[in-house]
Image: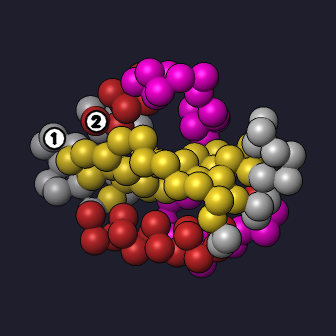
Amino acid sequence: MVSKKLLYHCSVSSQTPQEFLWNFLIINEPREIKTIRGKIFDQLRPLEELKSIDSCLIPNSQGIHYDLFSIYSSVPESKVDFSQIYIGFVRRDRNLQPKKSPSGWNGLIDLAFNGKI
C-alpha cells in the first residue's frame, strides 16, 4: 500500500545566497496534489522559479500519483508553516537534496514510481 505524504528539502541556492532551493515530492491523489502545491506556492511567494522534475501515476496504487518539483524562493525553511500546507505525513528528506544533473533524480523517481518511498 502506497502511503500519502509530503517530503521536502530546503537548501541555500548556490547561485544567490538570499535564495533557497526547495525540492518537493508529493505522493497523493491528483486533486490533493494540486491543493498541496497551491498551498506551497502561497507560503513560498514570491516564487523565483518553478521546475517540474517528474510526475506519474504509481502503478497498482489505486489512483495515487507522485509529483516531484523544485522551487527557488527567498523564503527560508524557518518561515514555512507546514501545518498550513498538509495535515498528514510531512518530513524533511535528504534524498531531495539538489542533484548535479537531471539524471541524478532517476533513483528517487524509480523508488517513487514503484511505491517504495
Which one is in front, 71 or 1?
Answer: 71
| Residue 8 shows in the view | no
Determine whether the residue tagged by mark 1 lies in a helix, strand or loop. Answer: loop
- Identify the residue at image location x=36%, y=64%: 33
Judge whether residue 104 is colored magenta: yes
Instruction: Please tell me which of labels 1 and 2 falls first in the chain.
Output: 1
Total tally of numbered discs in the picture: 2
Where in the figure is residue 87, as x and y percent of width and height? Answer: 51, 72
Colour scheme in use: secondary structure
Where in the figure is residue 29, as x and y percent of width and height? Answer: 27, 63
Instruction: Look at mark 1 in the image and give the residue it sits on.
Output: 59
Amino acid under disc 1: Pro
**Which image quarter: residue 49?**
bottom right
Determine whether the residue tagged by mark 2 lies in a helix, strand or loop. Answer: helix
The quarter of the rendered structure image containing the C terminus is: top left
96 relative to 89, above or below: above
Return the residue found at the far right. 17
Instruction: Look at mark 2 in the image and give the residue it sits on.
Output: 113
Where in the figure is residue 68, as x and y percent of width and height? Answer: 43, 46
Question: Left or right: 105 with respect to 21?
Answer: left
Q: Which span of residues is magenta-colored?
A: 78-106
Amino acid under disc 2: Phe
- Residues at badges 1 and 2 in contact (C-beta under 8 Å)? yes
Question: Left or right: 5 with respect to 16?
Answer: left
Question: Left or right: 8 with respect to 60?
Answer: right
Measured Cα–Cα span from mark 1 to mark 2: 7 Å
- Identify the residue at image location x=33%, y=27%: 110
